[in-house]
Image (spheres, helix red, strand yellow):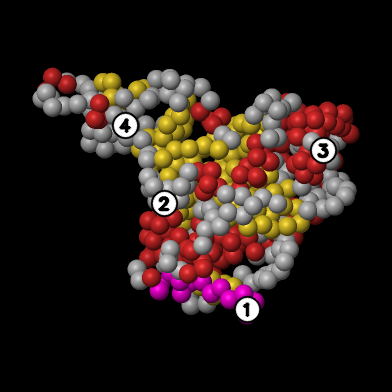
Amino acid sequence: MTSGAVSSNVLDDPRGDVFRVQRHAFTSPEVFAAERERIFERCWIYLGHDSEVAEPGDFRMRELGARRLLFVRGKDRLVRAFYNSCTHRGAEVCRERAGNANSFQCFYHGWTFANDGRLIGVPGDEAYGPGFSRESLALPQVPRLEQYRGFWFVCFDRNAVPLVEYLAGAVEYLDLVADQGESGMEIVGGTQSYAIHANWKLLVENSYDGYHAQITHARYMKWLASSGAVSMPKGKLANVARDLGNGHAVVEYAAPWGRPIAHWVPSFGAAAEPEIAAIRARLESRLGPERAARIASSSRNLGIFPNLVINDIMAITVRTFHPLAPGRMNVEAWSLAPCGEAVEHRKHRLENFLTFLGPAGFATPDDIEALEACQRGYHANPEAWNDLSREVGFEKPTVTGEHQMRVFWRRWLAQLEPSHGKLAEVRRVAAR
Ligand code: FES
Ligand code: FE
C-alpha cells in the first residue's frame, strides 16, 4: 500500500470545521491488511480479566483475529498467554473455550504440555535423537503480557511501551471501574458472542456515540419512561467527551437509568434503598465523597484503542471485537461486577445487562442493524465521505458530539502512517 492511500482516507481540517473519513477506510482490503500489521500486531490488545483465570489451571481460549491464544493460570499461579499451536506440527493444543486443566494434550499425536507451557509428554520419544530438546519445544508465549487492575493485555511487538504508559489517561477510568468492588471485581457468567457484518471501526464509533441514543434506542427510552424506572441524579451533571491520549477516549454523563452501585436506582425499588444507601456510605468512606459521587452518579463509555470498550452504565460491560474481513467482525462481551455483591443486586445488574445489551435486548440488535446498514451504505456509494464534524473546535465537547471519534481516527491514522506530521503525535493527557 502506498503511504498516500491511508492519509487520503481522513480529512482533518479544524480551521474549516471539517473532519471526514473516506468510506474506503471501512471497505478496502488494503486498509484491512495494513490495520492487521500496524494496529493489531503493534498495539496492546485486551485478552481477558484476571477473574476469568482465578484458580491454578483455569484457562480461556481467546480469538484475537486470526490468532488463537490460551489465557492460562499455571499451577505456580502465574498468568501466561500462549499461542494455541502445538510445537510438533502446529495443531491447536486446546479446543475447549474454557475450563481447568493441569495439562493440554494435543489430539493429533498426543504431545502434552503442562499448564505452565512445559512439554511433559511425547509418545514414542525413543524415536528421537539426542538433539531432541523438550525445553526448546515448550509452548511459546506471546512476546508481551501485562495487566492493569486485573485487565490483561497482550502485545505482539516486543518493543512496545509498557502497558500503563500505553493506557495513558485511560487508567483513571479503569480505576473508576476497578474501585467499585470492595474486594475486587469479577466477570460474571458467560460470554455474549456474536458476529456483525460491518467494519470493526463502526463499533468503536457506536460504543461512545451519544448522538444516536435517542433515535436508535427510542424504544428503550420509551420503555424506561413507561416503567417508572427513570430518574435523574441531582446536582451538577456530567456531560463531557475526553481525549485520554494514544487514541483512547471517554464520554462521561448522567443518564436516566439506574446504576446498581448508586443510591439513585429507582429500578431496584424501595426495598433495596437501605442496602444501596449502605453501599454508598461504604463507597464514600473508602474513596471520599467526591469520588464516590462520581462513580455513583455518572455513566462512562470508555474506548481503549483499538478495540476494547468498557461501558460503565446500567451495568458494566467489557466488550472487545476483532475484524475478520473489512466487512465482518466477531464481538465478545462480558458483564463485570463487584465481587461479593448481594444476590438481589447481582440479579438486577444482570437483568439490566440483558435488557439493554442482550441478544434480544433493546440496544444490541438495533445497533447491529445500524452498523450493517452503514456497511451496506458504503457499498452503495463507496466514493463518498462520512462526516464526523459535530462539535469540531468546541472547548468542552459533549457526549452527543463526535470529538471522541476524531480522537480514535487521528490515532488510527498515526498508527497506519507514523510519518503523518502532527497526527503522529502521541500525547499523554493529564487526568482532569
Ligand atoms: Fe501436536 Fe503432532 S501436531 S502432537
Ligand atoms: Fe447504541
Decide: is 102 above or below 250.
above
The amino acid type of the residue labelled 3 equals Pro
Instruction: Please name the residue shown 76% across and 57% down the image.
Output: 239
Circle 3 sits in a helix, a strand or a loop, which is it? helix
Q: Which residue is more in the foreground, 336 or 425?
A: 425
Q: How many numbered discs sit on the rendered protein?
A: 4
Name the amino acid type tagged 4: Leu
Q: Which mark is residue 42?
A: 2
What residue is shown at x 13% (from left), y 19% (from top)? 126
Q: Which residues are magenta?
A: 4-18
* Secondary structure beneath label 2: loop
In this rendering, the answer to whether 383 lies above or below 103 is below
**Mark 4 lies on residue:** 139
Give the left or right position of residue 311, taking residue 297 as reference: left
Give whichever of discs 3 and 4 has the lower sequence position.
4
Per the model, the C-alpha gap separating discs 2 and 3 is: 40 Å
How far apart marks 3 and 4 lie (CA) works out to 49 Å
> Callout 4: 10 Å neighbours few (<14), some, many (20+)?
many
Q: CA distance from mark 4 to mark 1?
A: 53 Å
Q: Is residue 208 visible?
A: no
Residue 140 showing in the rendered view: yes
Q: Amino acid at mark 1?
A: Arg
Q: Which mark is residue 289?
A: 3
Q: Secondary structure at mark 4?
A: loop
Counting from the top left corner in percent of width and height, residue 113 is at 32, 25
Judge depth for marks 2 and 4 and give the one in front.
2
